Image (tube, coloured by chain):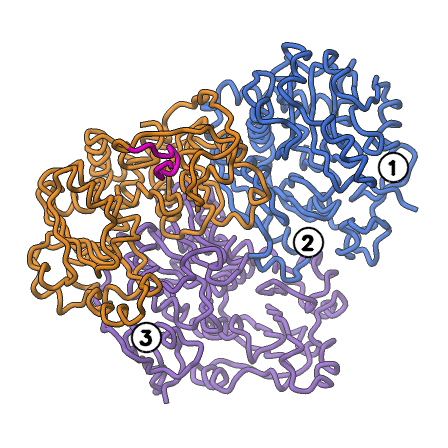
Chain colours: A purple, B blue, C orange
Amino acid sequence: MRHLIDFGDLPRAEWDALYTRCSEIIDHPADFMDACRGRVMASLFYEPSTRTNFSFQSAMLRVGGTVFGFADPKSTSTAKGETLKDTIKMVSGYADVVVMRNPREGAAKAASLYSDVPVINAGDGGHMHPTQTTADLTTITRLRGGVDGLSVGLCGDLKNGRTVHSLIKAMAKFKGIKFYLVSPRELAVPEYMRAFMKQNGMWFVEVTGLETVMPQLDVLYMTRIQKERFVDPLEYERNKGIYVLTKSKLERARKELLVMHPLPRVDEISIDVDDDPRAVYFEQARYGMFARMALLTDLANQSRMKPDAVEIGTRPVCSNPNCITQTDHYLPPLVKKNGDVDCCAFCDAALR
Amino acid sequence: MRHLIDFGDLPRAEWDALYTRCSEIIDHPADFMDACRGRVMASLFYEPSTRTNFSFQSAMLRVGGTVFGFADPKSTSTAKGETLKDTIKMVSGYADVVVMRNPREGAAKAASLYSDVPVINAGDGGHMHPTQTTADLTTITRLRGGVDGLSVGLCGDLKNGRTVHSLIKAMAKFKGIKFYLVSPRELAVPEYMRAFMKQNGMWFVEVTGLETVMPQLDVLYMTRIQKERFVDPLEYERNKGIYVLTKSKLERARKELLVMHPLPRVDEISIDVDDDPRAVYFEQARYGMFARMALLTDLANQSRMKPDAVEIGTRPVCSNPNCITQTDHYLPPLVKKNGDVDCCAFCDAALR
Amino acid sequence: MRHLIDFGDLPRAEWDALYTRCSEIIDHPADFMDACRGRVMASLFYEPSTRTNFSFQSAMLRVGGTVFGFADPKSTSTAKGETLKDTIKMVSGYADVVVMRNPREGAAKAASLYSDVPVINAGDGGHMHPTQTTADLTTITRLRGGVDGLSVGLCGDLKNGRTVHSLIKAMAKFKGIKFYLVSPRELAVPEYMRAFMKQNGMWFVEVTGLETVMPQLDVLYMTRIQKERFVDPLEYERNKGIYVLTKSKLERARKELLVMHPLPRVDEISIDVDDDPRAVYFEQARYGMFARMALLTDLANQSRMKPDAVEIGTRPVCSNPNCITQTDHYLPPLVKKNGDVDCCAFCDAALR
């Protein structure tokens, strides 16, 4: 692994190696206190994200590295019309690893083309957020001994949730997973995710109620439902209570259930759930830090490497208006296959 | 000591131990260069405060620790409606010690209920600012050999000054202090501070002029008078010159006087005082850093500890509109006694 | 050297020593990993400058030091009317070296009068930016073996470019330099720069076209031409293409030419030049970091030293409206000679 742009690019064996190191770090943190000594991380947050930003920073500091960067591009001159390419050429001259959050889809992939050092995608718009997935899998593996064979409930807005889609895709690397997809009909998983699960032989069932499936679950992954996602406000009023997890709903759940949430929550988990030992969402955030420590000990210690020259683009081949190629026209016209479909190699949108 | 929320909670013996370590750090800083190695401080400034923020950061760095955080919540997603509890659960998963400045009174106490690691109050609205008091006491002890028996002039706005009230309360831990309280009548110390001094057998006199008491003083603690505090603008015009310390006013002062100020000053100390050896306000800022180094070597090295579950509140018992319980309704309805009075355990306001 | 305010203050021997250390750092970075261990840099950016800020931060971190500071004074209380003197007294109590970028000319010199620790000028308005010059000279020396005897093309806006003026002045420390000054007539070097080159016996020629001089050049230093600098917009339209460097214009250039640029570029260097081995502007940014590492290993390790008391000013002697003395009236009325001319010792403007 040179960059981490998309968790899907990671073979199962690399994930296993990453988790093994992560697990060693959790058990013996002092052994890794100098693992990134002398190494510098650039933290480029083109949109605010306290949680991910803090998690990466504390991760780098805990393995003995150091950090510079910005948390909000408004206070930097980077906002003033410099291309992403030029920013990355500069920053990768100063840093040993670049962590980037950017509102444009495919921005991390674009950065990786020009960087002399590894790039980690800390979220590129609605596209990918691979280190959230590493946090989720670390939590499950650590607390349940493994991921294979688990019954996983995904609850809330399954249509728009980047986190949920990434997790489903990542789960294809494991065996015997059963998915209980709990959502209002209008916020069900998109058809292409359904196709993905079928293609990969993954068992799943779609329901609208949480309570009936509760006793089956090993993991319950809650996500937020935004009122504004509903076309019909009455539909929202009818539904909203169903997707709030309360202490009483947990009564029928298994004793070893894990209640997870990518955070921040709004009100989809009632505060009286926090003291239940099955509520592990705060531990999940902490495991995310350990997973990032493992990742950084690998990537921040790689040698500098001039990337190959790439073709200079002139206009975007992709029609996704949020794709990085829409603003940065010099990017090469890269295409990849997702299954049989020609897709933009930056944002994964199907090409027309 | 697990948290530092209120300097008043610190027994004299703990202060003595803290000062002893601080003094060792001042004399032998190199011995403490690794005292917090591997430890990470979260610096959460919900309102800007360059001075306190820089002092804590440099303190942590000088004992070998590292820092992440925000200096202004506007550029973080924390601003977007997450509860203080959830922020603290997350941050205390990443950090070994949390330093927090928050505009709401009682916020640091609230944070301490949920944090897995020690919390240090870096100012909670108009309520407490305990590490300013440690800076003040360190300066006096270091430069005068001790606090007992000193004659201390407090000059300026003694009605609204959080710093002055904290210092008076802290002085109750020492013996034989004489207070010369110099202020316009309308900005005299509040009645409850007067009661406090009487209760604790502390000698004090209230005057409106600085010059007459000047020859008596061992310490002169200047504070800013804000024009807008005066009801009558003419009263302000009559008074303003009295409370500006100039080089000539220092002529009648003792040779070993300490002129102190919590900074930033506006114009209450004339710039020609700066080169007088009795002007120690810049040293005072530096001693504040050493005091914070001592504090951090203690608190940042404590073990993580899950706090006990606390009752979930529903509505505030306190009627102080600036109290943290007014915005964070889940906080438990904690009450404490200040003397005979039932008070809010967060902001110390008397309950009705 | 105690402070670095103006590159012109540096004798050739000191530059040689600085470059020698810089060169050792480039060759053996691991030997310098602890060169500033325990040392803390304050980074005070009163105006945003991602590039310079990141370069200094990564430099300090790579020699084992640590950093605190602000990237934008809007989010600090420093903005609220504290004098520069008071801010510097405070910050130099916390830090071992102060790096400051400030929009007012002479601000770094002013800071150096009050600081207990070395001050490095990271840009004071349109006045000086000495570490950009160290970056430029390091790049040339490293890649061409030395500066003496080179033919240097300076292209673009030579009238307003602070970087270009500093570089010309710095080149006076070397022998046998030939300058090819390429600019539209209305953006030619100012008369006082022309006088400076003559005084110092430096060879130069002024031309409007880049292509004719291209074959002569060892170094081509490109700068940005801002449209708004032209009085006549038609003149801009006629000229703009001339000063854009493209791949095809490089065909007639020497094989060992260095194409340099202080960055960020807008469109004065076409993106197809980036992959030409003669394009070294991104390396130049990286050499800037190494030059700052060398500088910091020297300055951050000096002992603290109380500066001598200075006269308290009352009103500015300088009439430059951007001079720091216009806002900070307490500054002493310092005058220096530039050649025969009495100049403000802060901003170098000639006194009337």
Q: Which of C30 and A22 is in front in this view?
A: C30
> Regarding mark 1 in the picture, which secondary structure is present there?
strand
In this rendering, the answer to whether A266 lies above or below B296 is: below
Question: x and y percent of residue A148 in the render?
Answer: 49, 69
Marking on residue B337? 1
Left or right: where C70 falls relative to B320 = left
Left or right: where B172 falls relative to C332 = right
Q: In which quarter of the image is the C terminus of chain C?
A: top left
Q: How far apart are marks 1 and 2 (CA)?
A: 25 Å
Marking on residue C294? none
Q: Nearer the viewer, residue C5 or B14?
A: C5
Residue at 28% across / 51% down in the picture? C285
Q: Nearer the viewer, residue B257 or C329?
A: C329
Question: x and y percent of residue B231 in the render?
Answer: 83, 41
**Labels 2 and 3 touching (C-beta < 8 A):** no
Judged by its main secondary structure, the magenta piece is loop
Q: Give the range drawn in magenta.
A: C341-352
Magenta stretch encompasses residue C7: no
Amino acid at pointer 3: His
Examine the image and state in which quarter residue A83 appears.
bottom left
In this rendering, the answer to whether A46 lies above or below C295 is: below
Can residue A120 be seen here? The reply is yes
Marking on residue B85? 2
Judge if badges 2 and 3 mark residues of a common chain: no
Amino acid at pointer 1: Lys
Marking on residue A329? 3
Q: How far apart are marks 3 and 1 (CA)?
A: 67 Å
Disc nearest the viewer among 2 and 3 = 3
Badge 3: chain ID: A
Residue at 40% across / 51% down in the picture? C49
Amino acid at pointer 2: Lys
